Image: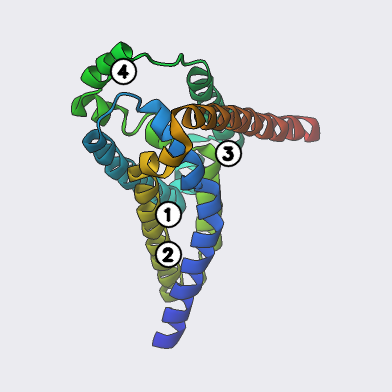
Amino acid sequence: MTFELLLALGKSFLFVFAALLPILNPAATAPIFLGLTTGASPSTRALLARRIARNMFALMVGSMLIGSYVLDFFGISLSIVRVGGGLIVASAAWRLLNASHASEDRRTALAEAFTPEHARNQAFYPLTFPVSCGPGSIAAAITVGVSLHDDRLAISLANMGGGVVALFAIGVVLYLAFRYAQRLLRPLGEAGTMIFLRLSAFILLCLGVQIVWDGVSELLRGLLAA
């Protein structure tokens, strides 16, 4: 029985890690994190990276374990979550895409304004949700959580335990990607980094539109079927 529980835990760990890491994709959102924290000091960015990773872990664990029950309680469908979250993603991407290049004086002003208190206020919205962990990730976590249930309580608990450990590992990857994002992009130079940030913002905008379209399409299919 112990071996069966360990096997279930290991399988669920690999399943959740492989299913959610590509969707969360910390490497792709790290440049967005840099763009949205322009003017922040390295210590402030380190503080933000730690808080975002912690928030993401809590949000994804909650979505995986009880997300489906919460949506059912309030009568909210995943389609509505996709539409609302996609609009937020597109809005954040549009602001980032149209942000002007900061001069040296502007950078100094931004650095003075981006205090640790300001960072704490932005740690959840928009840096955790929807940038790092959007509606698509939440929907995936809810779906994964449903698939982890088993008729046997012990196996179900082992599956959930493996999923929680997998999300913790993803949180560590997210923290490292955000914590050292500036160092990883340094070889590109200032001009290359700016171009990369603009491209990342455009991809994020397209992703937001895609999320909205997926939600609207599901709502339309349900309306036509009715």
Q: Are marks 2 and 1 in contact (CB under 8 Å)?
A: yes
N-term-proximal mark, 4 vs 2: 4
Name the residue tied to disc 4: 107
Name the residue tied to disc 1: 65
Amino acid carrying mark 2 in the image: Met
Q: Nearer the viewer, mark 3 or mark 4?
A: 4
Q: Are marks 4 and 1 in contact (CB under 8 Å)?
A: no
> Is residue 29 visible from the viewing direction of this image?
yes
Which residue in the rendered view is the most extreme toward the right? Answer: 224
> Residue 160 shows which numbered tag?
2
Amino acid carrying mark 3 in the image: Leu
Q: In the depicted view, which residue is nearer to us: 116 or 61?
A: 116
Q: In the depicted view, which residue is nearer to us: 205 or 210?
A: 205
CA separation in Å, label 3 and label 4: 40 Å
Residue 3 falls in which quadrant of the image?
bottom left
CA separation in Å, label 4 and label 1: 42 Å
Q: Where 115 falls versus 7 (above or below)?
A: above
Amino acid carrying mark 1 in the image: Leu
| Residue at left offset 24%, top offset 39% | 47
Mark 2 falls on what kind of element? helix
Q: Where 91 falls versus 171 (above or below)?
A: above
Name the residue tied to disc 3: 78
**Residue 204 on image: x %, y %:** 56, 31
On-image quarter of the C terminus: top right
> Is residue 152 visible from the viewing direction of this image?
no
| Residue at left offset 45%, top offset 53% | 64
**Residue 151 on image: x %, y %:** 52, 71
**Residue 74 on image: x %, y %:** 47, 35
Mark 3 falls on what kind of element? helix
Q: How many marks?
A: 4
